[in-house]
Amino acid sequence: MTETGIPHGRSTSTLGAATVAALRRCLGTRARWCLLAITLLLGLLAAVGLALAGPPSDRTFAKLSDLVQSLMSVIVPAFGILLAGDLRRRAGITRLMPTLLAAVLFAAAVGLFGFLVCVAALAMTTSTAPQPWRHVGTIAAGSILVQVVAQLVGTGLGLLMRRPALAFAASIVLPLGLWIVLGAVEVLNPAQALTPYSTVRHLLSGQMSALNWVQWLAVLLIWGVGLNALGAARLRRDGRPAPAPGRAEPVAEPVAGDHQGQR
């Protein structure tokens, strides 16, 4: 039994069903499928381009992953923003956890795709780099973690901002702009370590020290947990009560933009 009196098995089953439903909403319209196609195609073309046209000395798994995962991470937050918008358009606030779990799983799948693309691209080309496959294990984990943080930034901003276009612009301008500003002021340079862009460089290079892992955890807490906690508080202030514990999430109502994507 859980603290609410709901049998644990039933609560877990409800969470799983709600997470699956949220995963389906990630690609619930033709427009979202197109967005996914653009994301994956961008990563694929970047890998092929660097593997075939780049200097042989640059054909390393680290450089491929840096380019591929960085480009895809620009678009990935859009899915989190759309999922957050789905919550806003519902009749009442439902549990946020299934949506966040679905967003994380979706981002992990994108990161895994990018990893496999880089493996295939490097395997099918020649490289003059001394150790082209160096740190492949760490970079594989980093590829997923990069996309997860990017996605959580998207869900957080999507919950905080009502306009998806504004939230998407903020997902690019806010982390990168803060990194640039902190780098321009010498006394603030150490704070760059707490920006997503800084941790991306370490994760995708594979050169992760104990301090780098601590920095990544801090970034996750600030940009992932913190933004979504603020977003959840924003939803509560909207005055829409959450459903009783154990209840399944109602089906999200389609929106005008999604109708247009289905045409």
Image (tube, grey):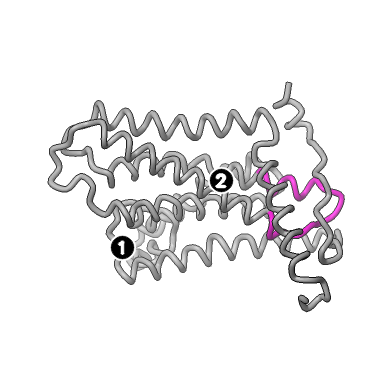
How many other residues sit within 10 Å of disc 1, few (<14), some (14-19) or many (≥20)? some
**Residue 93 magenta-drawn?**
yes
Q: Which residue is drawn at 38% across and 37% down?
A: 117
Task: From the top left corner, tell me how far across and down residue 1 is, in percent.
Answer: 78, 76
State the residue in front, 177 or 139: 139
Q: Which residue is drawn at 65% across and 29% down?
A: 31
How many other residues sit within 10 Å of disc 2, few (<14), some (14-19) or many (≥20)? many
**Left or right: 239 in relation to 87:** right
Q: Residue at x 31, y 63 (%)?
A: 208
| In the image, farthest residue toward the top | 263
Separation of residues labelled 2 and 1 (CA atoms): 24 Å
**Left or right: 221 in relation to 233:** left
**Left or right: 133 in relation to 202:** left
Q: Residue at x 81, y 56 (%)?
A: 248
Type of residue at label 2? Answer: Pro
Q: Which mark is residue 77?
A: 2
Q: What element carries label 2?
A: helix
Label 1, on which residue? 208
- In the image, the segment drawn in magenta is 82-98
